[in-house]
Image (cartoon, rainbow, N blue to C red):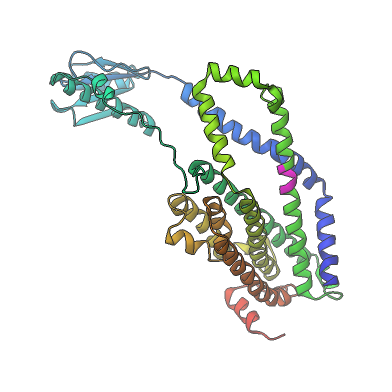
Amino acid sequence: MKNILLILKHEYITRVSKKSFIIMTLLGPILIGLFYGSIAGISYYQMSKKETRTILVHDPMQSLGQQLPKDETFQFTYTTSVADGKNLVNNNEADLLLDIKNKNGDSIDIVAKKSLSISDKGDLKSLLSNHYFNKRLAAKGLSAEMIDSMKSDIHMSDQLISGKSSATEIKSGIGYIGAFIIYLFIFMYGVMIMRGVTEEKNNRIVEIIVSAVKPFQLMMGKILGVALVALTQFAAWIILSGLLLTVLSIAIGLEAGAGANAVAAAQQNAPQQMGMMTEIMTQLQSLNYVKIITGFILFFFGGFLLYSSLFAAIGSAVDSDTETQQFMFPVSMPLIFGLVIAQVAVLKDPNSSLAIWSSMIPFTSPVVMMVRLPFDVSWLEIISSAVILYGSFFVTVWLAGKIYRIGILSYGQKASYKQLFKWLRMKE
């Protein structure tokens, strides 16, 4: 145990004191903010950008009627000939030609010089469908306004039997963000362990180290040391992100100390927005933060330990990074599969059989259980999943240690699955 702690301390201090670690720790929240800010900015720019498309319409049966649908994106013009319309499109004098085949307007050919985007095609289809719908309503003496007036604007407030808000949207967002963080850190630092082991093996430094400590102790020290590095960087990112948000809030005048006058003014000017903010705050208050944070730490650390032992075994078995690809795929697939299950099944029904069993399987539970945690998962399920996860880690690290013990001192031979199974069967 003493040797493991010494290696842990050395790995931790060495990696934390590197300039690259310090720089990424300081810049990480800023880069993440810029990344998502850029995505939001690009999305807003695309939504606000209005580029008018000229549409030629060949409608020999007058199915559209005399009045063409009006839209900011599409400008419609009639043409009496398909051939003339194609020539105009080919000469870039129009963007599209719509050839309406029948009176009902449910059969339309689109002719374009370049492929039409999915969004433009969908918008155009929706616009024409609404136009034909309104035309048929008018033929029966009705209007779209009359139909809309009959619809009810229902506001649903979902609550649990305990009286708290179910907060489905907030829980889904927090769960998936936490799961993605676990997924990201496992891969990022797991690969760091694998490459570190491979470098030490190639530099022959490990031959000196194993003369003083056992290979298993060396592997455990590396895994635990890098795990603490990952937790340190994550904690630093949380603190720095909080400070950054506070500074930004003060800069734009949204600090908590703005006072009751600002709140009253906001309520007077934008009651709907205040109602939305009140609902969000109510949902946030209904979350069990003790359970979410405790579960996050348990499955963050457990998932990292489980996969890091496999990454360390891979690093000890190969002589270069190029050889790791054949082993990385089967190791990483369960984690990727867990993220897919979280997106497809868990967010749809966090209490389904697939979600429950996937949160118990150790190779998918770090991601799947994290998504389920905000949805009032019982402590019994959390503890059971954690026990299985950490129990699987001890079994996995024992098996990985057998590969590490032999592979770390093996040179000049290309590793294969057959070779790894042979090492697993070898006795101490």
- Nearest the eye: 259 or 147: 259
Image quadrant of residue 102? Answer: top left
Give the x, y percent position of residue 381.
Answer: 54, 63
- Numbered range of the magenta stretch: 234-238
Image quadrant of residue 91? Answer: top left
- 258 lies left or right of 264: right
Please indicate, yes or no, whether residue 245 appears anywhere in the rendered image: yes
Above-or-below relation of 416 to 366: below
Please indicate, yes or no, whether residue 329 appears anywhere in the rendered image: no
- Nearest the eye: 197 or 334: 334
Please say whether residue 331 is one of the residues in the magenta stretch. Answer: no
Give the x, y percent position of residue 173.
Answer: 54, 43
Quarter holding the N terminus is: bottom right
Residue lying at the far front in this picture: please name it. 162
- Nearest the eye: 167 or 414: 167
Give the x, y percent position of residue 181.
Answer: 62, 49
Quarter holding the C terminus is: bottom right
Please say whether residue 236 is one of the residues in the magenta stretch. Answer: yes
Per the picture, the main secondary structure of the magenta-coloured stretch is helix
